[in-house]
Image (spheres, grey):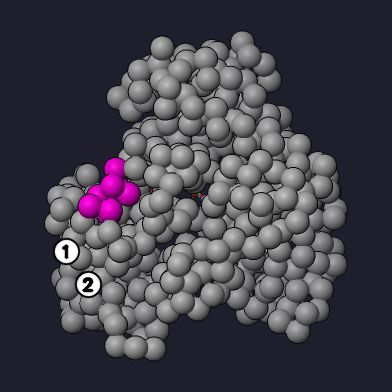
Amino acid sequence: MDDRKFSVLIAGGGSTYTPGIVLTLLDHMKDFPIRKLKFYDNDAPRQKRIADATRIILKERAPEVEFVASTDPEEAFTDVDFVMAQIRVGKYAMRDQDEKIPLAHGVVGQETTGPGGIAYGLRSISGVIELVDYMEKYSPNAWMLNYSNPAAIVAEATRRFRPKSRIINICDMPIDIMDRMAAIVGLKDRNDLVFRYYGLNHFGWWTDIRDKTGKDLMPEIKKYVAKNGYWVGGEFDKNTEASWESTFKKAADVYALDPTTLPNTYLKYYLYPKYVVEHANPHHTRTDEVREHREKFVFDECDRITKNGTARDLTFKSDEHSTYIVDLCRAIAYDTKQRMLAIIPNYGAIENIDPTATVEVPCLFGANGAERLAMGQADTFQRGLITEQNCVEKLAVDAWEQHSYTKLWQAFSLCKIVPDAEVAKEILDDMIIANKDYWPELK
Ligand SMILES: NC(=O)c1ccc[n+]([C@@H]2O[C@H](COP(=O)([O-])OP(=O)(O)OC[C@H]3O[C@@H](n4cnc5c(N)ncnc54)[C@H](O)[C@@H]3O)[C@@H](O)[C@H]2O)c1
Ligand SMILES: O=P(O)(O)OC[C@H]1O[C@H](O[C@H]2[C@H](O)[C@@H](O)[C@@H](O)O[C@@H]2CO)[C@H](O)[C@@H](O)[C@@H]1O
Ligand SMILES: [Mn+2]
């Protein structure tokens, strides 16, 4: 290691994930030292509650780190080495609509999947492009690690509209699943696994998983998943909410469809939409749970720290979301060539998939960003699913670019979880009204 210290900006400072990242950054001061921590958000009061607590945490644990929280792009994006982006354009109020509008029509209502995911995509594109432009203007040598969802649509948009920008789109779902796989086979964590994985974001499969000696772990993991899905239980899952428990368990049924691979949990929405709708409460969806639990917990805890003037007894913790993004920054900063997943243009990584598709594959992370690894050919089942879903994502970005009602109707209709074009149109027309402050006006 050299004597560099880094300046990190969290864009979406008011995110519920911000305190976890702050703690992880502090845990890594020895192997990823920071000199400055900055927050940027366009909602000043929301960001302030997290910033006030963060100021106290830093004062107690790393007083040498300079801290800035701002809603001014120039102040926030100047003198930055890494931008960690996690904005939610439209916030939970709009996520609520993404989930409840499709459900009212008997269709899966989900943050990043189906009509809800497309609606969120059309809100996110301009928000994330704006962040990229601020970074290029005020800190052109910085890298952006972007979590802002729906990452598949955002990544397709940045591939097309900002092809040279230093943004790398990422997801924590496979990371969480790999921590589970490690627990299943008795290893410490995901970093003990050597894996092959391919697909789209929230739409992929593992084809090979080994330990560091080369021992094939797939048979043992498959045997476990066939029975339990990715549910580990016990101490590992003591804080996992009931809806995530159901998703991790449902992976057993997703796995059954192709026992040659291990699936991403999100495939349940595409392969078992009838089950998902039957088990949903159209009046109380995942957004309500997040507001009642994670959002309430994070903001209450920040307010408590601020009121007490101390964070000595804080209960925030590092998790896979925060450790992954810090691992990625460290790999880029020190050119470690660590092998981790990213959502990037295909260009041959999956041989028999459109080269311009935006895929999720392992990459080597270093000073030049993410270098994709070749994952070979997708099998016919995967190729069919990927091709259809990638066209949905491309049509959504076409619709945003061309302000096209027809392209968006096509995207909704092509989507596997929407039963027919008439239902697609009904959902779309409701969503146009709900998103009038965010979407381009469609012609
Ligand atoms: N890729 C992944 O695997 C992954 C994992 C977890 C969360 N996420 C994403 O991270 C984001 C944050 O999630 P959350 O639940 O903490 O949401 P949140 O609503 O708590 O936080 C998002 C913040 O973004 C701010 N914001 C919205 N639009 C903005 C804009 N144009 N410019 C600046 N700030 C803006 C909001 O004011 C809010 O403070 C979401 O996009 C979520 O989907 C992604
Ligand atoms: O419904 P939410 O807001 O709780 O989560 C939506 C996000 O889900 C994934 O991330 C999960 C992670 O995989 C899970 O195990 C847990 O640890 O929390 C994470 C965030 O809640 C997914 O990768 C994200 O894209 C979603 O935004
Ligand atoms: Mn994700």
- In the image, taking residue 71 as reference, residue 373 lies left or right, namely right
| Kind of residue at badge 2 | Lys
Q: Is residue 270 above or below residue 67?
A: above
Residue 225: x percent and y percent?
78, 59
Q: As drawn, is 71 to the left or to the right of 384?
A: left
- The reply to whether the C-beta atoms of the residues labelled 1 and 2 are less than 8 Å apart is yes
In the rendered structure, does residue 204 fall within the stretch colored magenta? no
Which residue is at the front of the view, 319 or 29?
Answer: 29
Dot placed on the residue nearer the N-terminal end, 1 or 2: 2
Q: Position of residue 330 (x, y in %)?
A: 42, 75
Numbered label tally: 2
In space, the residues marked 1 and 2 are separated at their CA atoms by: 8 Å
Instruction: Give coordinates of residue 333: x percent, y percent.
Output: 39, 75
Residue 36 shows which numbered tag?
2
**Which part of the image, by quadrant, shows the N terminus?**
bottom left
Indicate the secondary structure of the residue bearing disc 2: strand
Q: State the SS at label 1.
A: strand
Query: Which residues fall within the magenta stretch?
Result: 130-137
Report crowding for label 2: few under 14, some 14 to 19, many 20 or more residues within 10 A (C-alpha): some
Magenta: main secondary structure: helix
Amino acid residing under circle 1: Val
Residue 206 numbered mark, or none: none
Would residue 427 be seen by someone viewing this image from the given angle? Answer: no
Residue displayed at 51% across by 21% down: 408
For residue 68, the mark is 1
**Which residue is depicted at the point 64% across and 24% down?**
414
Does 133 appear in magenta?
A: yes
- Across and down, in percent, residue 190 comes to 62, 72
